[in-house]
Image (cartoon, grey):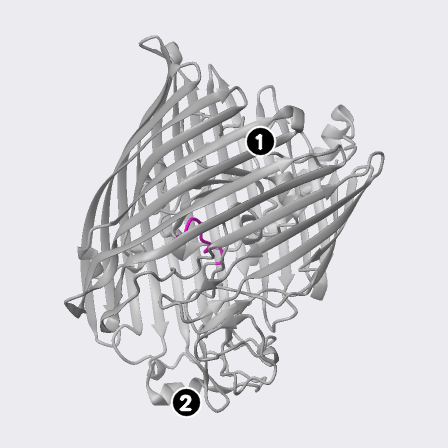
Amino acid sequence: MTIFIRTAMAAAAVTAFQASYAQEGAELGTITVEGSREADGLHLRESSGTASRLGLSVRETPASVEILTQDAIQQRGARTFSEALRGMTGLTGGGPPSSPTTLSTRGFSSLMYLYDGVRSSGAGVTNRVQDTWNYERIEVLKGPASVIDGEGAIGGVVNFVTKRPDRSNPNKEALLSYGSYGSTRAAFGFGGALGDASAYRLDYSRNDTKVGTIARNGERIDHFTSGLMVDFGGSVKLDLSFDYLRDDNQAYWGTPLVPASFATQPTNVVSTPDGRVIDRRLTRSNYNVPDDRNSSETYWLRARLTGRLDGGWSWRNELSANKADRVFRNSESAVFVAPASIARDQTLITHDQDFWLDRFDLTHKGRLGGMDNRFVVGGEYSETRFGSRRRFSDSSAATASLLRVPVFDPYLAPFDENPALSTGAGNRTNTSLKVKVSSVFVEDALKPLSNLTLVGGLRHDRTEVDRGIADLNLGSYTRFGASYRATSGRIGAVYDITPQSSVYAQYTNATLPVNSLFLLSASNAAFPMSRGKQTEVGFKQSIPEAKLEWTAALYKIALDNVLSRDPNDARNTVNNGRQSSRGIELSTVWRPTREWTLAGNLAALDARYDTLIEAGGVSRVGKTPPNVPERVANLFATYRPDGSKFEYFASINHTGRMYTDNANQIRINGFTTLDAAVSYRMQNVLLSLRVRNLTDKLYATWAGRATSQVLLAPRRTFELSAKFDF
């Protein structure tokens, strides 16, 4: 059935593409794109639905907002979400194959991910690798943002916006690429007018990436997105979408650290007090089972209905439904055991998720007491049903012996589903979950002066959780529930020093569960939500005569009610922990000459546990949280000689050191990488040759689950691509 669905969608899309091209080509003619892509700037005059529902521009918003357009994504060569996000200000880190976009920003890995402005509960558990082709832009709102989208956003919000129907842009485009180790990528998209007032859009991408420097490691993604915009007249419009995503990947969970005495080819990828290192002899090894599964299938259906009323009022209703099935069958842990073995585990997890959300709001633009005012009020309701089968290998000596393999043995036994390997409480469970969220929200933007905007917002969420756990080993069934009430707020001000320069300040807060609602235990359900707060000041400026835009932000974030151990009795779990960060972020785009465009960003922060007691009464006060580098910088340079059809591009990324554990005993050392590309414009085709990791740097990112292993990044690769515009 899955193969049939993929084939049918591809055939239908290709047929529609050919018909559309044949039909519209005579009317509209061929669009020839001259020259090269222009730098996108910082989009300070554009509005961002991620940061506010009031239609405020980025300059009017008292917060750090970053927008990455499709043109910039293509210019940087970002094929997946993870690659695109790592070039944005302060976003970095890694993530396991089960959750590949687990990045961190401003000292926290708790980010909320939106799909066309719609959240889906359990983002940290349900992230998937996706191709960037189907998206018009990526928007990032930094810092706590529960006032906009509810619980879960302490580090920030990332919104992936798909390409939408546009009557005024009836373009057709396609992409073909071939890269190192046989990696391929193919995509096309087209859209245009339907009738007198409506429009459509179809996009399909296929990504088959192979990481040849590590055995059995790669991604296969099929993604179809569509949009239909219908104008009913009288200001009422319907924006309808159906999207489909399928990924089937070979998973690499990390390379284990080994003692320096064992390593004959030690590297400086990591540093530990006891001298463990990454041995270059192991850098090509993948200790996952050869018959691993890391796949998902997702359907999205969305309908957005909008209209206008008299007196400056407008209304909007958004209905979104999502169904996803995921399978993870892996050996996720690889730990070195003397004298020369690797201890492994086994994990089998399935997800059966259904989600729907309906949101309605009313917006008014007018005057209040003689002052310009924008106001929105609304509410939303969502339900998530989530079922999961969970099978984990036990810690018995017999199981450990069976799963252990020699360090250099190329043969790895396949996954063994024998229940005898999963004895003990919690190792064979079937879980069910239902989450209901009811919310009301209000935002307001008031201009008491022509150059002063005051922005405020409130949101109240009521979350009901009902979870059941059937333990097949114990023959028991446990059912429990939890109810949470949370009110979030934001207040800020933007002062225009000049028409092109503004300074802002804001205070905002957020809430998030002490653990993912999908993984909530009966004991953790009794704890209230963690609460975060942020103060931020910043500056945004455009200097047209210098062709320069830049922004700066200073912030401080504190998160309370973090799970910890009782300092008086370390056997008891409490939630009196505290985590904080403070830092500075800078970003800029500058065209010093007609031929050169420079863009860059810098993030420097100090993140720490202010209060945290772990098992055994060990204090982690002053330690840096895992997956949080405290220095991140990116520089992008584009050179386009006058009158030339060539374009030259280079990017440099520097990521500072980070830790894999709360104790800060395993440090991933900082690294600097360089990418380069040259493009040639030939009529309606842009040919590009790209080299990633030009210096062939060996470096690592955070692996997520096991602290004693790291994810080695791909080494130097080449890619040749052709982008067609019709």
The front one of 252 and 205 is: 252
Q: Relative to 369, does residue 191 appear above or below in the rendering?
A: below
Q: Are marks 1 and 2 in contact (CB under 8 Å)?
A: no
Q: Which mark is residue 165?
A: 1
Q: Amino acid at mark 2?
A: Ser
Q: Relative to 165, does residue 367 appear above or below in the rendering?
A: above
Relative horizontal placement of residue 505, taking residue 254 as reference (left or right)? left
Q: Which mark is residue 519?
A: none
Magenta residues, start to end: 100-109
The front one of 333 and 140 is: 140
Q: Amino acid at mark 1?
A: Pro
The front one of 318 and 67 is: 67
Would residue 375 be counted in the magenta stretch?
Answer: no
Residue depicted at x 68% and y 65% = 696
Identify the residue at the far bottom of this view. 339
Residue depicted at x 35% and y 48% = 121
Residue 327 location (% of width, % of height): 44, 64
Helix, strand or loop status at disc 1? loop
Q: Specify whether residue 292 is in view.
A: no
Residue 722 location (% of width, % of height): 75, 47
Disc 1 from disc 2: Cα separation: 57 Å
Q: Specify whether residue 611 is in view.
A: yes
Residue under label 2: 401
Please tell me whether mark 1 or mark 2 is closer to you in this view: 2
